[in-house]
Image (cartoon, rainbow, N blue to C red):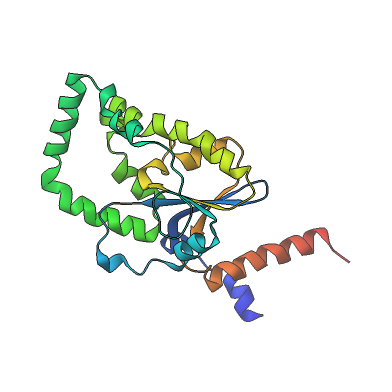
Amino acid sequence: MLLLLGSCAAKTRVGELKAALWKVQGDHNTVYLLGTIHVLSKQAYPLKPALERAFDDANQVVFKAVGKPVLGLETLRDQAEIFDRFNDEQNEQYLLSTLSGLPSYAKMIRQLVGAWKDGDVQLLDRLLNLDKLADPATQDVLFARRNSKWVPEIERFAHGDVNYLVIVGTGHLAGDDGVVAQLRRAGYSVQQLYAAYPPLQVILQSRCVWLSMRRKFFRP
């Protein structure tokens, strides 16, 4: 009892215990959204239990993966045509912006990997969507438009009868224009998952809420 009462006031650093993995509740199934980064070293493996459970639970994977039926959100032609939407000035600006950022690239990568491991969505959004304010046109082409194009397809998955694991770059999931935010605005329940299992303090806090509601609504 003392442990339970103490846990009600405990403050848990939940953000550090999350994964870059979200669960979308479908009509009769589950759609997992896994954010990836392309600079993980071999030290990042083995993957967190939540990622392995999502892969095991999925019937279909929307990306390239071994041992599962594979679908895609866009074709190779779609990807090749992304930069065709830029004019010469925009292409030059994008190249110069990339080159100017090279001196701080190593530090940014360390921050990015750390944020991904901790499931720190706010930091991931800042690091991956740096161009949102400085170059909104580029941001729109690389992220916002593609995210909006993918959402209806993910909604179609949510109306299916099997579980899906959708694997995309983390930058497409974070932020106001991200897939997660767009799905929530569309009315879907989207929950960021813990890296392993909920810590004891979080479980006890949930029980405290339940006990408080019970005392309020079910008084003898």
Q: Foreground residue, 106 or 153?
A: 153
Query: Measuring 30% from the left and 59% from the top, which residue is drawn there?
Result: 114
Residue 12: x, y in percent?
A: 49, 65
Query: In the displayed structure, would residue 108 be above or below residue 3?
Result: above
The N terminus - image quarter = bottom right
Residue beneath the point at 12% across and 44% down = 102
Q: Position of residue 36 (x, y in %)?
A: 36, 52
Name the residue located 40 percent from the left edge and 36 percent from the top edge. Answer: 74
Vertical arrangement, residue 156 with respect to residue 162, above or below: above
Q: Horizontal placement of 90 versus 146: left or right?
A: left
Report whether residue 131 is seen.
yes
**Residue 8 appearing in the image:** no
In the image, residue 199 lies at what x, y percent?
Answer: 52, 70
Count of numbered badges drawn on the protein: 0
Farthest residue, direction right: 220
The front one of 194 and 169 is: 169
Q: Quadrant of the C terminus?
A: bottom right
As rendered, which of 118 and 28 lies closer to the eye? 28
Q: Residue at x 63, y 47 (%)?
A: 26
163 on left or right of 48: right
